[in-house]
Image (spheres, rainbow, N blue to C red):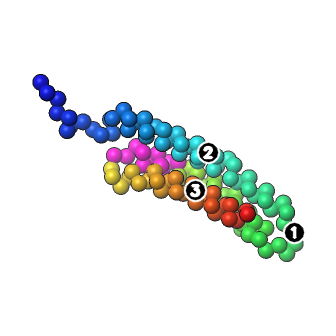
Amino acid sequence: MATNTTDIDPGSDPTTLVLKYLGGVVLWVFAAFTFLLLPLNVMASDGCFDGDTRAICTVAGQNAVAYVPMVTAPLAGVLGTYGLAAEGGRARGLYAVAMGMLVAAWVVVSAIAG
């Protein structure tokens, strides 16, 4: 008896599963680096002096550098994992959104601290 290949779930393809797994690992490693290393940029405020108008020399700038990665990384990790695990077409784009969030966190913190 011939097997009907149109009934096979595309998500059950071994190659797709491996790529999803690797994508999840990359996402969580990037999120971990963002969460652990990026807040250390607050040390860029060591060179501040009275009257310095750079963004890192303000309380708001230091708070942004410290807290943006701590909020963005776990949120992006969960959002991206959902995007990888979901079967719907729109949910698949959440992985790209999550990676974009992590990149944006690096850009914003670098802009403030730089």
Please tell me whether mark 1 sits on a helix, a strand or a loop. loop
Amino acid type at circle 2 is Ala
* Rendered image quadrant of residue 11: top left
- For the residues labelled 2 and 1, the Cα–Cα distance comes to 32 Å
Dot 1 or dot 3: first in sequence order is 1
Q: Which residues are magenta?
A: 77-87
Instruction: Read off the residue under disc 3.
Output: 103
Instruction: Read off the residue under disc 2.
Output: 32
Asked whether, in this view, residue 82 is left or right of residue 89, the answer is: right
Chief secondary structure of the magenta portion: helix
Nearest to viewer (mark 3 / mark 2): 3
Q: Is residue 70 above or below residue 53?
A: above
Q: Is residue 106 above or below residue 84?
A: below
Look at 75% across and 66% down and name the residue there.
56
Asked whether, in this view, residue 80 is left or right of residue 58, the answer is: left
- For the residues labelled 1 and 3, the Cα–Cα distance comes to 30 Å
- 59 inside magenta stretch: no
The residue lying toward the viewer, choosing from 80 and 100, is: 100
Amino acid type at circle 1 is Phe
Q: Is residue 60 above or below residue 42?
A: below
Say the numbered circle drawn on residue 49.
1
